Amino acid sequence: MISVFQIFRVLMGVIVFIFVLTFFLRVSDMYSSTQERGSLLETVNAFDHAAMQVYTSGNPTTFPGFEGFETLVYEAPKIKHDAGQKTLSVPVFFVPGTGEIMLERRCLDFGWYRWCMVLAFPKGTKVLFTPIENTQQTRDLIVELVDNLPSTIEFGICDGNGARTADKEGFLSYIAGSAGTEYQPCDVQLPEHYRLVTINSTWLKQTQENQAVFHTIIEPSSGIVYDAATGRSDQPRPYHDWMDIAVFITGGHRALDYKQAVFTLELEAATGIMHQRTVLVSQKTKELNRQPCLECSTPLPEACGWTDYRGMGHESQIYKDFISSLLALKGAMGGSYHSQLDGTVIRYDELKSRGCE
């Protein structure tokens, strides 16, 4: 006959077994969760490293993608994902995807200053244009934008109920011969990996409520860009070059706000450095050409400005003009500075063409 003590011992054994089993299951689950979290963090860190390599070297590369992420949102400069979030080390603007992602560096070159970023799109991404305002200005804008977007993207036209795509070369060839063609607003149900860009001179009321893609509206006459889903209610952003539009296509107004903030900050620092350098170079030019042995040597080009050994001034306006344009740019940095920036480019090109760089 089983005693009460034996029954108690069996019950205690079962209880201890259940406790131990539950403990190990929980530990195993925690370990598995930690491993998964670590794997996700490694993937994001690897993407950040790949972007840095492309940014510094200029060599394009591919990234395997973000397989295994239930949620992943990119709001420049941060990637927010299942394991947390990470601020990327360099300016990167990309469309998250599960497939292979192509990363390429693109730059704005002003001669005396260059600003670069990394663009990244999943392979298979398609960008469709609807140039309702099909002017030469519009076609030039499309060509410049397509030239600078990653080469793995397919480009095309959406005209009313029809959409067709081609590789970059084929699309550019089509655009070159599309003068006089009239297009209707896109009314096609497009998959998520599409990006739609409509170009029109005035605000276009969005009637395609079933569009699943990110739809960018460009108004060249106003110089603004905005998301069709919100229209002008979400404060349309001014654009100043192809890069602003490319950034908006990848991440909307938040991405463009980030790009413009970083660009302005770095441009202001570069302007100060270039101003100091130009002042020093112009002063050094005078000092070197003021030596008594100048008649025995080859002077710098007169266009750069110099003073001969007798103290006779031969100073040109070339340095003064460039320095003045830099000061004007620095003074306008808090507001609309793009016309001043264009002025520095003109002055620098003149400086360079005369051999005074």
Image (spheres, grey):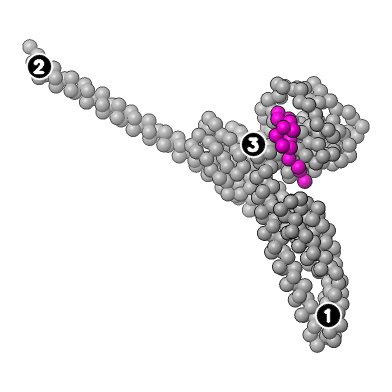
Q: Are marks 1 and 3 in contact (CB under 8 Å)?
A: no
Quarter of the figure that contains the C terminus: bottom right
- Earlier along the polypeptide chain: callout 1 or callout 3? 3
Return the residue at label 3. Answer: 95
Let me know if residue 140 is in the magenta part.
no
Q: Is the residue marked by circle 3 packed among few (<14), some (14-19), or many (20+) residues within 10 Å?
A: some
The magenta stretch is: 226-240
Q: Position of residue 237 (x, y in %)?
A: 73, 40
Q: Is residue 286 above or below residue 35?
A: below
The quarter of the picture where residue 349 lies is: bottom right
Q: Are marks 2 and 1 in contact (CB under 8 Å)?
A: no
Residue appearing at x 74%, y 51% in the figure: 335
Task: Looking at this view, name the residue that lies furthest to the top.
Answer: 1
Return the residue at label 1. Answer: 307
The quarter of the picture where residue 352 lies is: bottom right
Q: Position of residue 105 (x, y in %)?
A: 68, 47
Of badges 1 and 3, nearer the viewer stands 1
In front of the other: 311 or 237: 237
Image-based side of 324 in relation to 23, left or right: right
Image-based side of 179 in relation to 127, left or right: right
Q: Is residue 60 visible?
A: no
- Earlier along the polypeptide chain: callout 2 or callout 1? 2
In front of the other: 332 or 20: 332
Return the residue at label 2. Answer: 4
- Checking the image for residue 252, the label placed there is none
Q: Amino acid at mark 3?
A: Val
Q: Amino acid at mark 1?
A: Thr
Q: Amino acid at mark 2?
A: Val
Residue appearing at x 53%, y 30% in the figure: 70
